Image (cartoon, helix red, strand yellow):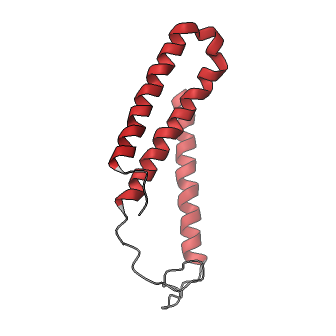
């Protein structure tokens, strides 16, 4: 009985979506030209190809952001419960900081924090 309702709901969703797409295809005007097919970049004329190579530094910054963002996400619950966790919780957070600090030192030594 439960799956009957789910199947009816799915069928209605597919039919309604198909009907809306079909109606918009039939009703909407379609008049392509060179100006409409041109890439729009905030009103600024296109200066170069959009498929340029990114610097590896961009990816390093993204990875560093993710690394330290995750650190913050894990630190908030610990800060809320630090009295209840006691000494074992403090040791675990110390190990967590040690691993993250070693990653930061590695990035620093490799020059990941320097922009030229």
Viewer-proximal residue, 91 or 42?
91
Name of the residue lying farthest toward the front: 109
Above or below, comparing residue 90 to residue 6 in the picture = above
Left or right of residue 2: residue 60: left
Left or right of residue 58: residue 42: right
* Number of numbered discs on residues: 0
Residue 1 can be seen, yes or no: no
Task: Please tell me which residue is depicted at 57% across the width and 42% down the height of the picture.
Answer: 9
Residue 71: x, y in percent?
51, 33
The part of the image, by quadrant, that contains residue 53 is bottom left
Name of the residue lying farthest toward the bottom: 34
Viewer-proximal residue, 26 or 63?
63
Above or below, comparing residue 88 to residue 78 in the picture = above
Task: Please tell me which residue is depicted at 59% across the width and 63% down the height of the picture.
Answer: 20
Quarter of the C terminus within the rendering: bottom left
Residue 42 can be seen, yes or no: yes
Task: Please tell me which residue is depicted at 44% across the width and 21% down the height of the picture.
Answer: 95
Residue 61: x, y in percent?
45, 52
Quarter of the N terminus within the rendering: top right
Residue 38: x, y in percent?
49, 85
Above or below, comparing residue 105 to residue 19 in the picture = above
Residue 8: x, y in percent?
55, 41
């Amino acid at each position: 009985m439960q799956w009957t309702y789910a199947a009816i709901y799915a069928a209605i969703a597919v039919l309604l979506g198909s009907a809306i797409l079909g109606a918009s295809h039939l009703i909407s005007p379609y008049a392509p030209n060179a100006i409409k097919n041109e890439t729009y970049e905030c009103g600024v004329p296109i200066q170069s190809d959009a498929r340029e190579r990114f610097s590896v530094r961009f990816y390093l910054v993204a990875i560093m952001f993710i690394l330290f963002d995750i650190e913050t996400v894990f630190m908030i619950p610990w800060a809320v419960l630090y009295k209840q966790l006691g000494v074992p919780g403090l040791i675990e957070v110390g190990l967590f900081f040690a691993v993250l600090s070693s990653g930061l030192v590695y990035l620093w030594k490799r020059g990941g924090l320097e922009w030229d």
